Amino acid sequence: MDFIFAFMIVMVFMVIGEWVSTLSHAFIPSVFVTAVVFVIGFWTVLPKNIVTTASFNTNFITICISLLLVHLGTLMNLRELVAQWRAVCIALLGVAGTLLLTLVIGTFIFDWHTVVAAVPPLTGGLVSALLMTNGLKAQGITALVALPVSMFVIHSVIGYPLTAVMLKQEGKRLVTQFHNNGEQLNPNLPKFKESNKPQKIEKQIFNLPAEYQTSAFIMARVAIVALLSNWVSGLMGNIINANVICLILGVIAHQIGFLEDNALNKAGVFNWLMYGLLAYIFAQLSVTTPAEMGTIIFQIIVLIFLGLVGMFLASRLLAKPFGMSWQMAYACSLTSLFGFPADYILTSEVAHTVADSDDSEEYLLQNMMPKMLVGGFATVSVASVIIASIFLKLL
């Protein structure tokens, strides 16, 4: 019965986050609330292994990530993916701004090892935090082992609401543009938001009767693409992260008709996989303790401030040349703090709250979601691994 109780607690924490987000009209993001609830729980009565007890273990999460990224590929087309090069540039240049300010000014305030251990998680979220934690253990620098994950905990708490504010400002601008300028939805893009309206028949290479188009059939095809993506990444020596290849091959599989629009939503499993992935991410918050946090909180706050200022300056200066509002540019840069799936959830919540109709909500998703997703992949899935690898050699 323990595993059912653990699952119930995890889902209750998710509900609390969603309800607070709804009550605050997405001013307080659900991922922020749930993260805070998990931290409080881990620091008080919650067992450290509650997420794995609830069945969300490493194997399940590995499957989740690959399937969800292939699914996201079914929400874009190749032209749209290529068109997001500006979001990639903005996100990476925002990371460069963070590195510049934290390394130049941070090393005047703190010792070299402290800055090197803390900065990668600030530019790559959980991936970099785990890499740096393992690196510090291997180097025997035990005094700083708690720093990377603690940085992830604190900057997530700051990054979620800050990104939501930027997206809400951008969303309001886009809604006004949608109504005043007679903007139209892009007919070449799949629907981000599921609709009850009848939709046109999609191009498919499988001409099977409806009774054979089951959820298992959809999931099997998504799994095939995910498996192929991981195999290709392995063949390339993981030079290109498997997550990035999952997205690209998901787009291609959708374009040729191997996968339908919004594949995992149509299979009815998207939310289940998303909750599992979120639970696993929040489980990492169990590593820190109040005592450990108290000894390093000053370093973390100062470095986060420098990092966010660096991102802001880069985004503000480069937004206009790259054809974006500074709010959208800054939101793209901020994806380096958390990446997927938080970027997807934040954008979805804000679009749903700010929009005043189904069409305007879809318009917001078409204009914001690809930028946020691609920006997050560029920073967290690619740049963060490179930065963490370099910084590990600098310890």
Image (cartoon, grey):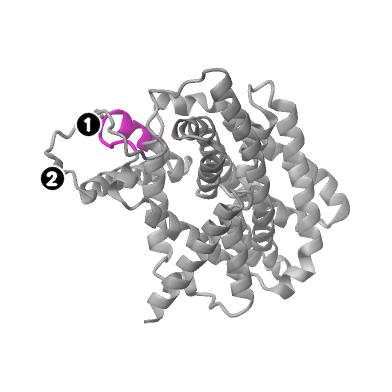
Image quarter hosting the C terminus: bottom right
Above-or-below relation of 33 to 372: below
Side of 111 where 218 appears, left or right: left
Identify the amino acid type marked 2.
Glu
Image quarter hosting the N terminus: bottom left
Residue at horizontal 45 percent and vertical 26 percent from the top: 80
Residue 381 drawn at (x, y percent): 53, 44
Residue at horizontal 58 percent and vertical 20 percent from the top: 180
Identify the amino acid type marked 1.
Gln
Residue found farthest to the right: 108
- Reply yes or no: does residue 257 show up in magenta: yes
Cα gap from disc 1 to disc 2, whole angstroms: 16 Å
Above-or-below relation of 196 to 319: below
Identify which residue, 229 or 16, lies in the foreground: 16
Of labels 1 and 2, earlier in sequence is: 1
Mark 1: few, some, or many residues within 10 Å (few <14, many ≥20)?
Answer: some
Q: Is residue 367 visible?
A: yes
Q: Which residues are magenta?
A: 248-261
Residue 40 drawn at (x, y percent): 63, 71
Residue 204: mark: 1
Residue at horizontal 41 percent and vertical 39 percent from the top: 193
Identify which residue, 137 or 14, lies in the foreground: 14
Residue found farthest to the top: 181
Please name the residue that numbered disc 2 is placed on: 211
Query: Of helix, strand and loop, which one carries label 1?
Result: loop
Q: Is residue 120 visible?
A: no
Residue 365 drawn at (x, y percent): 49, 35
- Reply yes or no: does residue 160 show up in magenta: no
Image depth: mark 1 or mark 2 in front: 2
Query: Of helix, strand and loop, which one carries label 2?
Result: helix
